[in-house]
Image (cartoon, grey):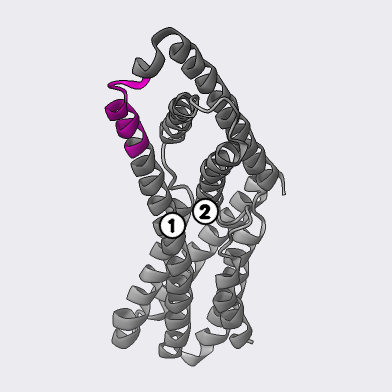
Amino acid sequence: MHFTLTAVLVAAGLFAGVLLFLELGRRVGLRRLRQDGDAAGAGVGVVEGAVFALLGLLVAFTFSGAAARFEDRRNLVVDEANAVGTAYLRIDLLPAAAQGEMRDRFRRYLDARLAVYRALPDLKAANEHLASSNRMQQEIWAQSVAESADSQSARMLLLPALNEMFDITTKRTMAAQAHPPLVVFGLLFVFALCAALLAGSAMARPQSRRWLHSVTFAFALAGSVYVIIDMEFPRVGLIRVDSFDKVLVDLRRSME
């Protein structure tokens, strides 16, 4: 909820800033009209078009990147479920006496993995669960190596499956931390305000303010930025990947 409020405040700040710069641009435009008359807007169309084009490209690429990372994070949840499920099935290759303890380790490991993402946005608790799951990885690997010493099929099939199961945790951790540099968002804000200034100047010819156009323009920019930010943090905002955790939850139930 704290993150959602922060994202809303950022979007609201951009909304207010765009409206402010539209008004500033309008006043600058009115002053130029009084000084230069009809020649006030001569030769500025190229600059306005370039700024709006760059703003559109920046919003498009930032939105596209956020959407791609959101989709990657969802796919990684499914990949982890598949990797854990495959490794769990291959426990059958171990000696019968070792299978019970190994299955119990897998259950506790998957519980720890689920707890990592359920703890968010509490990073301290999430890191504690992550450290716990990493310790369990070492235990599972050590026992698997020891128990598969006399089984070539276990060494060839179980150990690679475990390696893939462990690797996916690193991929998910890094994917959760992958975000555009802050300078990209800063540039997006600067371009939005510059575009608002130019748009306000272009709307200076009518004496009355065009509130409908101004509010629509500000809302479009602020709404786009809000959605981009929300998709970048899909564990703490309104746009979430939590529903995909169901595949891990279902896998955990199947282990009973």
Q: Secondary structure at mark 1?
A: helix
Task: Please indicate, yes or no, whether residue 169 appears anywhere in the rendered image.
Answer: no
What's the magenta region?
41-53
Residue at the spot x=59%, y=76% of the render? 246
First in sequence: mark 1 or mark 2?
A: 1
In the structure shown, which secondary structural element does the residue marked by tag 2 occupy?
helix
Pick the front one: 103 or 36: 36
Name the residue carrying label 1. Answer: 67
Residue 48 within the segment the image draws in magenta: yes
Q: Nearer the viewer, residue 149 or 85?
A: 85
Q: As displayed, is residue 31 above or below residue 220?
A: above
Q: Residue furthest right?
A: 1
Quarter of the rendering containing residue 105? bottom right
Magenta-colored segment: predominant secondary structure: helix
Farthest residue in the front direction?
Answer: 38
State whether residue 140 is above or below residue 171.
Answer: below
Q: Is residue 151 above or below residue 193?
A: below
Mark 1: amino acid? Ala
Residue 116 appears left or right of 54: right
Task: Name the quadrant containing residue 18.
Answer: top right
Q: Quadrant of the C terminus?
A: bottom right
Q: Position of residue 160 (x, y in %)?
A: 33, 74
Q: Three-letter amino acid code at disc 2?
A: Met
Identify which residue, 7 or 114, lies in the foreground: 7
Does residue 117 sit above or below 65 in this rendering?
Answer: below
Q: Which residue is mark 2?
A: 231
Residue 183 at x, y = what percent?
A: 42, 30
